[in-house]
Amino acid sequence: MCDAPIGVFDSGIGGLTVLREIRTLVPQETLFYVSDSGHVPYGEKSPEYIRERCRFIASFLLERGAKALVLACNTATVAGVGELRTLYPQLPIVAMEPAVKPAAAATRSGVVGVLATTGTLKSARFAALLDQFASDVRVVTQPCPGLVELIEAGDLHDPALLALLRGYVEPLLAEGCDTLILGCTHYPFLRPLLEQWLDPSISLIDTGAAVARQLQRLLASRNLLANGPRGVDRFWCSGEPAAMQRVLPLLWGSAEPVAVLPGN
Ligand code: DGL
């Protein structure tokens, strides 16, 4: 039993789609969330740059007593999780990966589409995932530059966002994809938009809930679950706190104070 916080981070607000799954599954836990909004997007940045950000944010969260880390970011995972696991071998670290395995099991057309950042799709980790789980299906990948920035702005009804999204998704549908992997933690925010115009036979898959379950299993196996009443949520960002404060009511569901990440 341990009431220390769980540290969760992303390049921006995308990790909130994972944080909400964690909050629902383990309401007793205290959750510390860092949005690296001063450095968003990660998608087009070098692995070295992202690794440096991962080290910096991980050490900030550990200094505040985090008992576990969640890399709520596919792009940070492919660049940085290996190094963090080497630096902190005893620490429970949970990370993201695009849902290739469940998508390969779910597709009926045999064609799976992956929406993700350029960094994720170019990585050796993603190639290994395809080798392991996608040998019996065809996988069509679609990098989505520009999408994260528009989601960060918090206006999910922006016509420019819808136009960009359609431009990325329509070629996947033309290829015969019946299952689309939302391989970036920002994209589950687009689910309601996508469901408005996609045929209901198209499945959208992300791994937020699976990551929350994995975190719960890992904490339970080390006797680290909190057992108090509801835990608290605290938020930091490396960019402009007012910008994050503005989108939290829309994308997290409540107004929250946001502190500046020291030394960001
Ligand atoms: N939310 C992130 C991911 O899961 C990163 C997006 C970005 O900063 O480009 O990949």
Image (cartoon, rainbow, N blue to C red):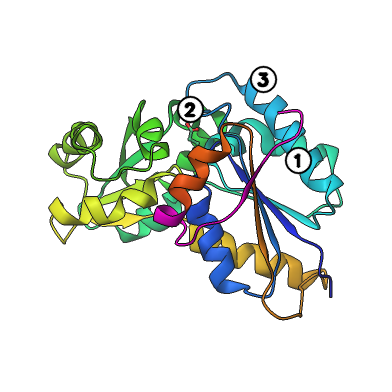
Compared to residue 219, the image places residue 164 above or below, namely: above
Compared to residue 109, the image places residue 82 above or below, namely: above
Give the quarter of the image for residue 34: top right
Residues rendered magenta in the picture: 249-264
Quarter of the figure that contains the N terminus: bottom right
Q: Main secondary structure of the magenta part?
A: loop
Q: Which residue is mark 1?
A: 58
Q: Residues within 10 Å of mark 2 (few under 14, many from 20)?
A: many
Residue 263 among magenta residues: yes
Residue drawn at 84 percent across, 70 percent down? 2
Give the quarter of the image for residue 218: bottom right
Q: Which residue is mark 2?
A: 43
Q: Which mark is residue 48?
A: 3
Query: Which numbered disc, 2 or 1, marks the residue that appears first in the sequence?
Result: 2
Compared to residue 261, the image places residue 42 above or below, namely: above
In the rendering, at what x and y percent does residue 196 appear? Answer: 16, 55
The answer to whether 22 appears left or right of 63 in the picture is left
The answer to whether 237 appears left or right of 45 in the picture is right
Q: Is residue 151 visible?
A: yes
Residue drawn at 44 percent across, 62 percent down? 253
